[in-house]
Image: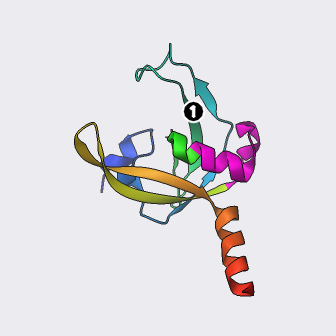
Amino acid sequence: MVKISDMDEFLHADAVFDGDIIEIVGKGRYVSAEDSTFERPYLEIPVKLPDGKTKTWTPNKTTLHMLAKAFGDDADLWVGKKVKLNISRQNVRGKMIDVLYGESVIAEEKQTVQGRIR
């Protein structure tokens, strides 16, 4: 069986399930606004999916801020960190699409532990 999502080098919502945990497997690559087809800077991060396949992930700003808060401001140090993906259906430029958001697994574990203590 050939899955179309396997043919894309970039991570999209159709390649994962809500709640999947991915692992950052390499240093991010900064793409400047001048080099971007979107005319804005972004970060490309190599990740490993639960099935072992690797993709390039371009997290949105909300996710980047959450990951920086959990893992630190230097994205080079994120290698080996795990991220839980959440899929949210929302309106982007007048079109309803599935958007990926990520949260650190560390932050989730801390919340769970704190929840058990209280």
Residue 9's quadrant in the figure?
Answer: top left
Residue drawn 54% across and 54% down?
Answer: 102
Q: Is residue 116 above or below residue 104?
A: below
The amino acid pointed to by label 1 is: Leu
Residue 57 shows in this picture: no
**Mark 1, secondary structure of its residue:** strand
Question: As drawn, which residue projects farthest toward the top?
Answer: 34
Name the residue: 35% across, 53% down: 14
Range covered by the magenta-colored residues: 64-81
Main SS category, magenta section: helix
Residue 116 x %, y %: 70, 85
Task: Identify the residue at horizontal 43%, vertical 19% (top origin).
Answer: 39
Where is residue 104? Give x, y as percent.
64, 58
User: Which image quarter holds the C terminus?
Assistant: bottom right
Q: Quadrant of residue 31?
A: top right
Residue assigned mark 1: 43
- How far across and how far down the image is residue 86, in percent? 46, 60
Vertical position of residue 103 compared to residue 38: above or below: below
Confirm whether residue 111 shows in the render: yes
How many labels were placed on the picture? 1
Residue 28 located within the stretch drawn in magenta: no
Give the quarter of the figure containing the N terminus.
Answer: bottom left
**Depth check: 99 or 79 in front?**
99
Q: Position of residue 7 (x, y in %)?
A: 37, 42
Q: Is residue 71 left or right of residue 101?
A: right
- The one of 40 and 20 positioned closer to us in this rendering: 40
116 on left or right of 87: right
Q: Is residue 74 magenta?
A: yes
The vertical placement of 7 against 105, above or below, is above
Residue in the foreground of this view, choosing between 52 and 20: 20
